[in-house]
Amino acid sequence: MKLIPWDSLPLETLGDGIARRYLTGEKITVAQFVLKKGAAVPEHSHESEQISYVLEGVLRFVVAGEPQMVRAGEALIIPSNIPHSAEAVEDCRALDIFSPIRQDWLTNDDAYLRGGVKK
């Protein structure tokens, strides 16, 4: 067991208007994203199943070519290996849960979030 104050996690600036905090256990990654209105996460896919829960604002997802508006208090389940993107329709905060863990984040191999730049 390990207690981690959320605000003790570094807030990482990724791209124009996108920042995140995350932690990883043995089988799950949990992330909080902060997105400014108009910020976009380009289309990508990953092995992890994803649940995105919008805490504040509105996110427009496109999952396998199908658009979906997700508002505060709503969640979206994105299956493993399905291409998806997101854009902040308003300033947003979202909680994303991934299983298995996001190994690409741990190795800084997430250039799609960093404007194409590997950290």
Image (cartoon, rainbow, N blue to C red):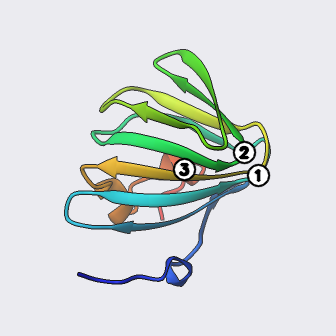
Q: Residue 1 appears at what percent x and percent y?
A: 23, 81
Q: Residue 9 appears at what percent x and percent y?
A: 50, 79
The kind of residue on which mark 3 rests is: Leu
Characterize the local packing of mark 1: few (<14), some (14-19) or many (20 or more) Cα atoms within 10 angstroms.
Answer: some
The kind of residue on which mark 2 rests is: Ala
Characterize the local packing of mark 3: few (<14), some (14-19) or many (20 or more) Cα atoms within 10 angstroms.
Answer: many
Characterize the local packing of mark 2: few (<14), some (14-19) or many (20 or more) Cα atoms within 10 angstroms.
Answer: many
Residue of label 2? 39
Q: Is residue 64 above or below residue 99?
A: above
Q: Residue furthest front?
A: 73
Q: Residue 20 appears at what percent x and percent y?
A: 56, 62
Disc 2 or 3, which lies upstream in sequence? 2
Q: Is residue 18 above or below residue 12?
A: above
Is mark 3 in CB contact (under 8 Å) with mark 1?
A: no
Residue of label 3? 113
Residue of label 1? 36
Gap between marks 3 and 1, in whole Å? 14 Å
Task: Say which of marks 2 and 3 sits in front.
Answer: 2
Q: Residue furthest top?
A: 66
Is mark 1 in CB contact (under 8 Å) with mark 2?
A: yes
Q: Give left or right: position of 91 versus 114.
A: right
Residue 13, numbered label: none
Disc 3 or 1, which lies upstream in sequence? 1
Q: Give left or right: position of 105 versus 47.
A: right
Q: Secondary structure at mark 2?
A: loop
Q: Residue 80 appears at what percent x and percent y?
A: 30, 33
Q: Which residue is drawn at the image coordinates 30% and 42% (left, top)?
A: 48
Gap between marks 2 and 3, in whole Å? 11 Å
Task: Say which of marks 3 and 1 sits in front.
Answer: 1
Q: Which residue is drawn at the image coordinates 57% and 36% (left, top)?
A: 42
